[in-house]
Amino acid sequence: MADSCALTELEQCRRCPRLVRYLAELPPKGGRSRSEYWNAPVPAFGSPSARVWLLGLAPGAHGANRTGRPFTGDGAGDFMYPLLHRAGFCSQAEAVDAADGMVLQDLYISNAVRCVPPQNKPTASEFAACRPFLAQEWQQLSRLKVVLALGRDAFISFLHFLKGQGLIERLADYPFAHGVRYPLPGGRWLVGCYHTSRYNVQTGRITAELFLEVLRQVDALRNEEAAP
Ligand code: SF4
């Protein structure tokens, strides 16, 4: 995260006891040792001057939780980054680790929950505990035009955030679907997209073409002029 105070607060955050315990116990994979893992809240990736904010669910146990960078080092990122590169949102197709030279272009990536949860399933209270970081980002991203929420859970957590801020009235007015888009206050947009998880890729729920179509929509929305 670009703001140093926010980074310190995130690094020190222990608001979710279940996730803190899980981080302390998570066994490494692939012949790696625990010392090769990040095993801490994973900060956002990208510049706060970006106009597009991609919001995932939570760090992958052996991806972002290992490398310390969202969607880096696991199947979800291996699917996503080459497509982001094709669409012009990042400097290279391959995301290997936090030192691979990847630069995001007009894109900022973070997760609704910053610590890896067991079975990729945060509880309602863990979503709520992590929502103050969404509020910080909403403030910091001064040029923000589009929030691209990956998966229903991140989408709904973001709606809870908007409702808590008084920016929307009813979650039921914003049903999740792939490719759905809703105008938000301030000329911003919320776009829904199936998550790029390995499971969704393997089952064909998300395909390269489906993801690229959403990115084309995001590209058009970020360049849209605000209504007078
Ligand atoms: S998930 Fe978020 S709120 Fe919970 S301990 Fe991690 S950083 Fe803190």
Image: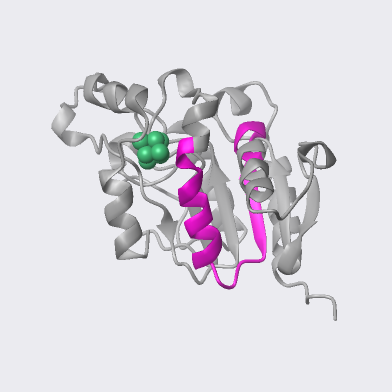
Query: In the image, residue 141 lies at what x, y percent?
Result: 53, 66
Identify which residue is drawn at 48% across, 24% down.
120
Examine the rendering and report whether any part of residue 80 can be seen: yes
Examine the rendering and report whether any part of residue 73 can be seen: no
Q: Which residues are magenta?
A: 129-155
Query: In the image, residue 50 lies at what x, y percent?
Result: 54, 68
> Is 228 situated above or below 103?
below
User: Horizontal placement of 114 versus 128: left or right?
Assistant: left
Quadrant containing ligand 1 reads: top left
Identify which residue is drawn at 75% across, 51% down.
168
Identify which residue is drawn at 35% across, 44% down.
42
**Residue nearest the viewer, comparing 199 with 47:** 47
Residue, far bottom: 228
User: Horizontal placement of 110 versus 152: left or right?
Assistant: left
**Residue nearest the viewer, comparing 30 with 144:** 144
Query: In the image, residue 228 lies at what x, y percent?
Result: 85, 81
User: Horizontal placement of 86 versus 77: left or right?
Assistant: right
Query: In the image, residue 46 lies at what x, y percent?
Result: 44, 61
The N terminus: image quadrant: bottom left
- The number of discs equals 0
Colour scheme of this structure image? one colour
Q: Quadrant of residue 118?
A: top left
Identify which residue is drawn at 27% across, 22% down.
21
> Is 105 situated above or below 85?
below
> Is 66 situated above or below 124?
below
